[in-house]
Image (cartoon, helix red, strand yellow):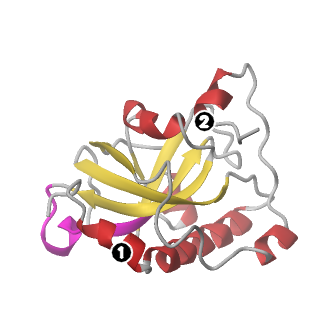
């Protein structure tokens, strides 16, 4: 049987607990994920105005995130399991370099370390933005899956995995079959 999608898990009366990240699982992390070109269900196109989230990404974890509205992540919930994904993102209405398409990592799930009560899609765009961009339109192209959603015994372990996720995303996007998506018609180029 295939892994349950986010939609399957939302239909349950009780969410299953996420596995806890262990030192063994951390040591076994690959440096690159996925085939040489995106495979179904990817690419997945998402778009929406950036919403205020919990404010933990930048303040608590040192990794600012942009949240899409709940309804804009529906295309992913039908076909994907909770976890961490990679691809590209672009925020509209920003000046210069900030307006370009940038690599991103995205957490889709309930963030068990923080015991979220609702599903979120939290996107970390790998670029240094000078200001926040709440309510700006953001377009995202999800190209692959990095790992399942995990729980953590410490904030430091979570931060360590996020940094690994970012490296894995950049390594995975560096392949020609993925790089070309930075110029996809989905984005305002």
Check if mark 2's residue and mark 1's residue have beta carbons within 8 Å: no
Q: Secondary structure at mark 2?
A: helix
Label 1: few (<14), some (14–19) or many (≥20) C-alpha neighbours in 10 Å = some
- Quarter containing the C terminus: bottom left
Q: Identify the residue position indicated by label 2 in the image.
A: 6
Specify whether 47 is left or right of 100: right
Q: Identify the residue position indicated by label 1 in the image.
A: 179
Specify whether 113 is left or right of 64: right
The foreground one among 57 and 189 is 189
User: How far apart are the alpha carbons under marks 2 and 1?
Assistant: 27 Å
Foreground tag (2 vs 1)? 1
The foreground one among 160 and 105 is 105
Label 2: few (<14), some (14–19) or many (≥20) C-alpha neighbours in 10 Å = many
Q: Is residue 172 above or below residue 122?
A: below
Marked residue nearer the N-terminal end (2 or 1):
2
- Residue 27, by quadrant, is bottom right
């Amino acid at each position: 049987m295939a892994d349950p999608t986010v939609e399957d898990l939302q239909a349950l009366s009780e969410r299953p607990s996420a596995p806890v990240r262990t030192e063994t699982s951390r040591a076994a992390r690959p440096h690159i994920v996925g085939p040489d070109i995106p495979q179904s269900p990817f690419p997945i196109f998402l778009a929406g105005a950036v919403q205020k989230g919990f404010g933990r990404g930048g303040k608590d974890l040192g990794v600012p995130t942009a949240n899409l509205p709940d309804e804009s992540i529906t295309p992913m919930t039908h076909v994907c399991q909770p976890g961490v994904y990679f691809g590209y993102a672009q925020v509209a209405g920003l000046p210069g370099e900030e307006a370009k398409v940038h690599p991103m990592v995205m957490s889709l799930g309930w963030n068990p370390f923080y015991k979220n009560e609702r599903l979120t899609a939290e996107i970390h765009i790998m670029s240094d933005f000078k200001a926040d961009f709440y309510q700006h339109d953001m377009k995202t192209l999800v190209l692959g899956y990095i790992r399942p959603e995990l729980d953590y015994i410490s904030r430091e372990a979570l931060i360590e995995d996020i940094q690994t996720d970012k490296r894995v995303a950049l390594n995975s996007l560096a392949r020609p079959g993925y790089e070309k998506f930075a110029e996809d018609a989905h984005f305002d180029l």
